[in-house]
Image: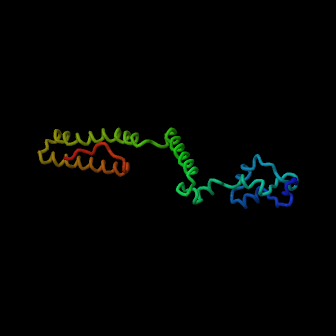
Amino acid sequence: MASSDGRQSLPQFSKSQLAQLFGVHRNTVTARLRDAVPDGYTHKTNATYCLPTVAHLLIDTNAILASSPAADPENMPPDMAKDYWDAQLKEQQFRQRDGELWRDAEVLDVFASVFKPLANKVRSISDAVERRAALTPKQVIAVQDACDDALREMYDEVEKVVGGIALDAEPADP
């Protein structure tokens, strides 16, 4: 179809040719041009399109924006930077509501619910071994030291995982 805006003189491309030009799969082109009106036809069934008609539908603007130096909020004008940070905050809030992100306190509560019973069991090992094996005081101290070392190692591993989050209490020193 020749249009009155001068497009009749522009080259027209099939969906396969557009896929090659824009570096996307032909199915992607078909999906993005679903509502686009063809600028012409070849053999009465194969639609053809002029670039000005469909380019905006085929360009991945998110990829362009992400690779642009202007995508850095430090390089944006103040109003755009504000919009950027507002969008980041809304995304974070959505991800929290969706259960994908957790607040630090919630994560620490989960760690505590897992490790407190475990720590209590480790602390009770020396008493149980002392009663069952009739250990000498020196042996009891050695078992207690081993349990304290195990608790210290667990605490250190948890501290590595949670990073800079302040833990409420460190394990008791012997």
Residue 158 to residue 52: above or below = above
Residue shown at 22% from the left, 42% from the top: 125
Relative to 87, residue 58 above or below: below
Q: Which of these two is toward me, 150 or 67?
A: 67
Number of numbered tags placed on the structure image: 0
Residue at 15%, 47% in the rendered image: 141
Which quadrant of the structure image shows residue 124?
top left
Q: Which residue is depicted at the point 55% across and 48% down?
A: 82
Residue 19: give x, y in percent of width and height: 73, 58
Where does the image place residue 99, in percent across and percent down from the top left?
49, 40
Give x and y (percent) for residue 33.
Answer: 75, 50
Quadrant in the rendering for residue 11: bottom right
Q: Residue at x 85, y 51 (%)?
A: 45
Left or right: residue 78 versus residue 150 is: right
In this rendering, the answer to whether 109 lies above or below 72 is above
**Horizontal and vertical percent position of residue 142:** 17, 49
Indicate the colouring scheme.
Answer: rainbow
